[in-house]
């Protein structure tokens, strides 16, 4: 199993589209899964791809290895795009459960070497995607430059330094930032180096890129989705495993517009607007 995993991870790195992917066509966007293999299996049975996974495949749930392996297999086969989440990082996996899960399933003698391959692979995953020239997909939120204006996708794509953590502030914020019910920005309760971005930041970001909306994951919402800043930012959450058992699982179809749907019923989901996330 360890050798097959290592081979799969090498193929993921080889096929990486870079830090910002450019996509065309219809995609089924999937929010945080956090080891929820049952929901992933349901998704693959009932929804035709290709899929756009928004990150956070591991930690918290019991089957992170199965989830991330399946997502990466779909990516290698050209059936999905896998963005990076903030949990695709050693700083989260050590305490979040994925490293322990690997050691339980692969054995203590092998898990360390395999996890180092995961580290290298996580660092190569795209941080964002531009879909049909109209929509931006990422895990966390709009990153801010030193002058507190929104960074561009081009700047995100040029992130440098050690991307394992990552140390680049724009890359880090893309994985960690959240929208807020505010006009500009505010420090995030998630910790140093992270920010909450408001309506004006979102407007400036979309104006720079001539885009209509941003779809993201990252934030747990019991209703499974939320609309922010007049619908210019949309959050979806897909896991119902571990601490999220009572979540209403949502996905979104991204095509000429973004339509948020209930995973099981395929009916349009009612997403609360302008929630105060913290």
Image (cartoon, rainbow, N blue to C red):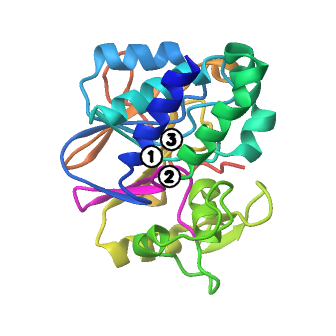
Q: Which of marks 2 and 3 is nearer the N terminus?
A: 2
- Measuring from the top left, give residue 233's x and y in whole percent: 45, 55
Circle 3 SS class = loop
- Label the magenta part by its dominant secondary structure: loop
| Circle 2 SS class | loop
Magenta span: 124-143
How many C-alpha atoms fall within 10 Å of the one at disc 1: few (<14), some, or many (≥20)?
some
Between residues 126 and 267, which one lies in front from this camera angle? 126
Q: How would you rate the neighbour count of disc 2 (Cα within 10 Å): few for under 14, some for 14-19, many for 20 or more?
A: many
**As displayed, is residue 209 above or below residue 213?**
below
The disc at residue 13 is 1
Label disc, if present, on residue 124 of the rendered structure: 2
- Residue 176 lies, in percent from the top left, at 64, 55
- Residue positioned 26% across, 34% down in the render: 50
Cβ–Cβ under 8 Å for marks 2 and 1: yes
The first of marks 2 and 1 along the sequence is 1
Q: Are marks 1 and 3 in contact (CB under 8 Å)?
A: no
- On the picture, is 121 further left or further right than 76? right
Q: What residue is drawn where x is 49% and y is 36%?
A: 9
Q: In this view, does 230 lie above or below 54?
A: below
Residue 260 seen in render: no
| In the image, residue 26 lies in the stretch drawn in magenta | no
| Residue occupied by mark 3 | 272
Which percent across, then down, holds residue 201? 52, 73
User: Marks 1 and 3, how far apart in space?
Assistant: 37 Å
* Nearer-N-terminus badge (1/3): 1
Q: In which quarter of the image is residue 112?
A: top right
Disc 1 on helix, strand or loop? Answer: helix
Q: Quadrant of the N terminus?
A: top right
Residue 129 in magenta stretch: yes
């Amino acid at each position: 199993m360890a050798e097959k995993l290592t081979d799969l991870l090498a193929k993921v790195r080889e096929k990486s589209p870079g830090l910002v992917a450019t996509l065309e066509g219809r995609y089924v966007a999937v929010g945080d899964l956090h080891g929820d293999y049952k929901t992933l299996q349901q998704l693959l049975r009932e929804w035709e791809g290709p899929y756009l996974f928004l990150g956070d495949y591991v930690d918290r749930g019991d089957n992170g290895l199965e989830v991330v392996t399946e997502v990466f297999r779909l990516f290698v086969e050209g059936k999905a795009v896998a963005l990076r989440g903030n949990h695709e990082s050693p700083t989260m996996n050590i305490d979040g459960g994925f490293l322990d899960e690997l050691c339980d399933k692969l054995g203590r003698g092998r898990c360390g070497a395999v996890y180092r391959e995961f580290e290298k692979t996580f660092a190569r995953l795209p941080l964002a995607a531009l879909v049909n020239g109209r929509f931006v997909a990422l895990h966390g939120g709009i990153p801010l430059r030193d002058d507190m204006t929104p960074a561009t996708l081009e700047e995100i794509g040029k992130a440098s330094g050690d991307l394992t953590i990552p140390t680049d502030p724009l890359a880090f914020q893309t994985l960690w930032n959240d929208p807020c019910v505010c006009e500009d920005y505010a420090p995030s309760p998630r910790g140093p180096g992270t920010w909450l971005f408001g309506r004006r930041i979102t407007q400036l970001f979309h104006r720079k890129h001539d885009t209509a909306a941003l779809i993201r994951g990252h934030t747990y919402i019991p209703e499974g989705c939320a609309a922010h800043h007049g619908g210019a930012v949309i959050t979806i959450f897909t896991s119902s495993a571990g601490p999220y058992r009572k979540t209403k699982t949502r996905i979104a179809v991204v095509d000429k517009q973004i339509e948020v749907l209930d995973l099981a019923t395929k009916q349009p989901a009612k997403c609360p607007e302008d929630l105060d996330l913290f």
